[in-house]
Image: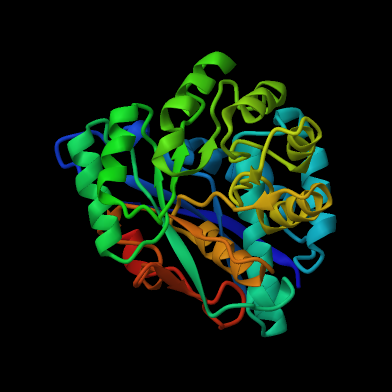
């Protein structure tokens, strides 16, 4: 099964995240952009993947189309390890993290979609088999920066059936506002997005939020690759620490684990090398006794691949779902219902992108 074409499509849509007067969260998004990678073969099968997007979409797309796609033509789509090894080695001078790695991640996801379709099996079957028919979702709220808006949207998430809530707030009153409306048995996950420049600031923050029922503090310090600083936060915070969404490969996680920096590893399938990258992180995390809860605040094949990964995991963990309503989602069937997302059983990723998403 040889690759005949590698192309991209952008799904760009308006969205509502519960703050009509403000910018789109901490990324200041004006639209929700998803970069889809399409791989066609001489067997008549097509696979879909996703490279990390948002404001990175044009750069990741350029890396895929200009650098990576020409090398893929004529390659055997069935031998995913060989092709990905070839590409990672050939393009390592462009950086082991960033747009080239994001593009390679999208390609890898598409190849796994093809592998499932060629075998007539869903992706989760290729990953060891489905352990659950639906996966709990957690509402990943964008940043609001105002306690009243945080309360309003946290309450909306609870009303929709979510029993896991993540905030991207960095001000304690905003986090306390969420706790006022979120039942005490539902923990809050706090993604700080590397806000603090030093360990002492992060520890002061941890002390302030500790009474608020926190499951973990995510990426507490800048820069995200400073494993030693993250480890110091973990040692002193008296709260679990999560990190890894900015890791570009399994070696980055190896450094985090060696430093004893994290309780929860968060590989992002659209950044870390696709399904192959997440599998490598899972194997390494098992050796170190670290829990894996993938990062997945996106809406395309990356979210769908993460759903399959979670369905096949031995221990149930929640799927991160951006708490934003898209006017034209790539996969309408991925909308959570009652706080859960159903796992598809058709071959490959199990769903095809909705053509309306490209309108």
Q: Residue at x 25, y 59 (%)?
A: 327
Q: Nearer the viewer, residue 350 or 129?
A: 129
Q: Nearer the viewer, residue 204 or 328?
A: 204
Q: Position of residue 187 (x, y in %)?
A: 44, 50
Q: Position of residue 281 (x, y in %)?
A: 74, 50
Q: Residue at x 53, y 22 (%)?
A: 203
The answer to whether any part of residue 18 appears in the image is: no
- Examine the image and state in which quarter residue 132 appears: bottom right
- Asked which colour scheme the image uses, the reply is rainbow
From the image, which quarter does the C terminus lie in? bottom left
Residue 265 against residue 163 in the figure, above or below: above
The answer to whether any part of residue 304 appears in the image is: yes
Q: Nearer the viewer, residue 198 or 30?
A: 198
Residue 252 against residue 82 in the figure, above or below: above
Q: Nearer the viewer, residue 200 or 354?
A: 200
Q: What is the total number of numbered labels drawn onto the structure image?
A: 0
Q: Residue at x 76, y 43 (%)?
A: 250
Residue 321 against residue 190 in the figure, above or below: below
Q: Is residue 344 left or right of residue 263?
A: left
Q: Which residue is at the far front?
A: 211
From the image, which quarter does the N terminus lie in? bottom right
């Amino acid at each position: 099964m040889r690759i005949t074409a590698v192309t991209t499509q952008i799904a760009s849509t308006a969205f509502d995240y519960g703050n009509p007067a403000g910018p789109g969260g901490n990324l200041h998004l004006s639209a929700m952009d998803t970069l889809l990678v399409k791989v066609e073969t001489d067997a008549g099968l097509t696979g879909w993947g996703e490279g990390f997007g948002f404001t990175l979409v044009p750069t990741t797309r350029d890396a895929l189309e200009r650098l990576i796609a020409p090398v893929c033509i004529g390659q055997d789509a069935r031998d995913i390890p060989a092709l990905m090894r070839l590409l990672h080695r050939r393009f390592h001078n462009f950086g082991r993290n960033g747009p080239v790695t994001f593009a390679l991640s999208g390609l890898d996801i598409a190849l796994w979609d093809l592998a499932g379709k060629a075998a007539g099996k869903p992706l989760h079957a290729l990953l060891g088999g489905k352990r659950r028919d639906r996966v709990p979702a957690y509402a990943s709220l964008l940043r609001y920066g105002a306690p009243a808006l945080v309360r309003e949207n946290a309450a909306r998430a609870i009303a929709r059936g979510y029993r896991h809530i993540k905030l991207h707030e960095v001000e304690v009153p905003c986090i306390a506002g969420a706790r006022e409306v979120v039942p005490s048995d539902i923990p809050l996950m706090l993604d700080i997005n590397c806000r603090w420049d030093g360990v002492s600031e992060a520890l002061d923050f941890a002390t302030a939020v500790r009474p608020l029922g926190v499951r973990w503090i995510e990426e507490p310090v800048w820069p995200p690759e400073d494993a030693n600083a993250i480890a110091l936060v973990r040692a002193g915070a008296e709260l679990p620490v999560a990190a890894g969404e900015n890791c570009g490969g399994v070696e980055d996680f190896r450094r985090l684990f060696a430093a004893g920096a994290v309780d929860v590893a968060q590989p992002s399938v659209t950044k870390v090398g696709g399904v192959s990258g997440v599998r490598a992180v899972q194997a390494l995390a098992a050796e170190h006794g670290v829990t894996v809860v993938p990062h997945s605040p996106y809406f395309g094949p990356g979210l769908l691949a993460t759903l399959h990964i979670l369905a096949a995991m031995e221990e149930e963990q929640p799927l991160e779902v951006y708490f934003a309503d898209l006017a034209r989602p790539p996969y309408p069937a991925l909308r959570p219902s009652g706080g859960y997302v159903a796992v598809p059983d058709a071959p490959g990723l199990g769903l095809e992108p909705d053509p309306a998403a490209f309108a």
